[in-house]
Image: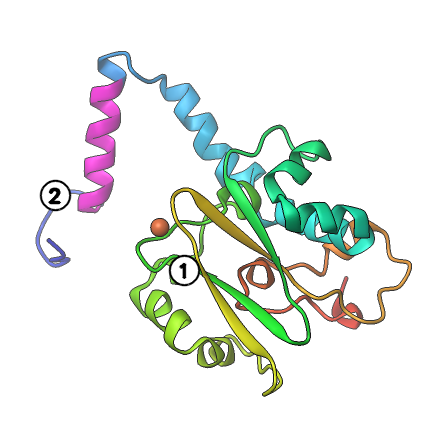
């Protein structure tokens, strides 16, 4: 299956060839419109990305009422705030504190909050991350360059096809009075997965 040395007579991988064949058949049978498919792919490549999650986190930092609603029912709170056209995932937001740091993983495959973060990074789908995020979250964070205080507890959340998670990191000190737009520039994708922290205010553009 995973023999990368054999000749395809093509630059495409087995997977790409399978996807192309499937798309061709579905198009010929009239099940899909290639233009619609292109629009969906384009949306996830260019329009839907971590900037959406960053807006949600920034709003939670700036608005305690929204944060309460978000932690109680993330999909409902984001929908009620009319921030985006639609949220299809059942989304759960988990907030970091000095006592608890949250990390999101999908131990089975690669379930990920696409609506909030766009396409998942390659490492998120890797077997080492999927196993070590559970067995050694502190070690995983260290590899991402993050060292948390010894007293901080880790809580690992296992995403599924039905339930996706987004981490609300702690609001960085020194951001008092910042607008939501400015706050959002500090919120990285990894901070919302739990494998990173927000950018320090001094390092922001
Ligand atoms: Fe999965």
Q: Magenta stretch mostly in which secondary structure?
A: helix
Most extreme residue toward the right is 177
Dot 2 crowding, Cα within 10 Å, few <14, some 14–19, many 20+: few
Q: Is residue 85 left or right of residue 41?
A: right
Q: Is residue 19 magenta?
A: yes
Most extreme residue toward the left is 6
Of residues 98 and 45, the one drawn nearer to the viewer in this rendering: 98
Task: Give percent across and percent down for residue 104.
Answer: 48, 61
Q: State the residue at coordinates (41%, 78%).
A: 136
Q: Is residue 140 above or below residue 81?
A: below
Q: Which portion, as a residue range, is magenta?
A: 13-26
* Residue designated by label 1: 124
Please tell me whether residue 122 is drawn above or below residue 40 in the rendered image. Answer: below
| Residue 19 located left or right of residue 133 | left
The disc label shown at residue 9, or none = 2
Foreground residue among 81 and 181: 81
């Amino acid at each position: 299956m995973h023999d990368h040395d054999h000749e395809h007579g093509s630059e495409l991988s087995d997977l790409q060839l399978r996807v192309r064949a499937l798309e061709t058949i579905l198009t010929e049978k009239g099940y899909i419109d290639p233009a619609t498919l292109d629009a969906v792919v384009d949306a996830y490549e260019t329009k839907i990305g971590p900037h959406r999650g960053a807006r949600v986190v920034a709003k939670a930092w700036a608005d305690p009422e929204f944060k309460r609603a978000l932690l109680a029912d993330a999909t409902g709170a984001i929908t009620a705030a009319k921030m985006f056209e639609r949220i299809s995932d059942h989304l759960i937001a988990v907030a970091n504190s000095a006592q608890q740091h949250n990390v999101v993983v999908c131990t089975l495959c690669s379930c990920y909050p696409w609506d909030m973060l766009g396409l998942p990074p390659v490492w998120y789908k890797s077997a080492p991350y999927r196993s070590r995020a559970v067995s050694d979250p502190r070690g995983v964070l260290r590899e991402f360059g993050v060292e948390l205080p010894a007293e901080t507890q880790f809580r690992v959340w296992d995403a599924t096809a039905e339930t996706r998670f987004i981490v609300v990191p702690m609001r960085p000190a020194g951001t008092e009075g910042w607008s939501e737009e400015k706050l959002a520039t500090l919120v990285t994708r990894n901070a919302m997965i739990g494998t990173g922290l927000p950018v320090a205010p001094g390092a922001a553009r």
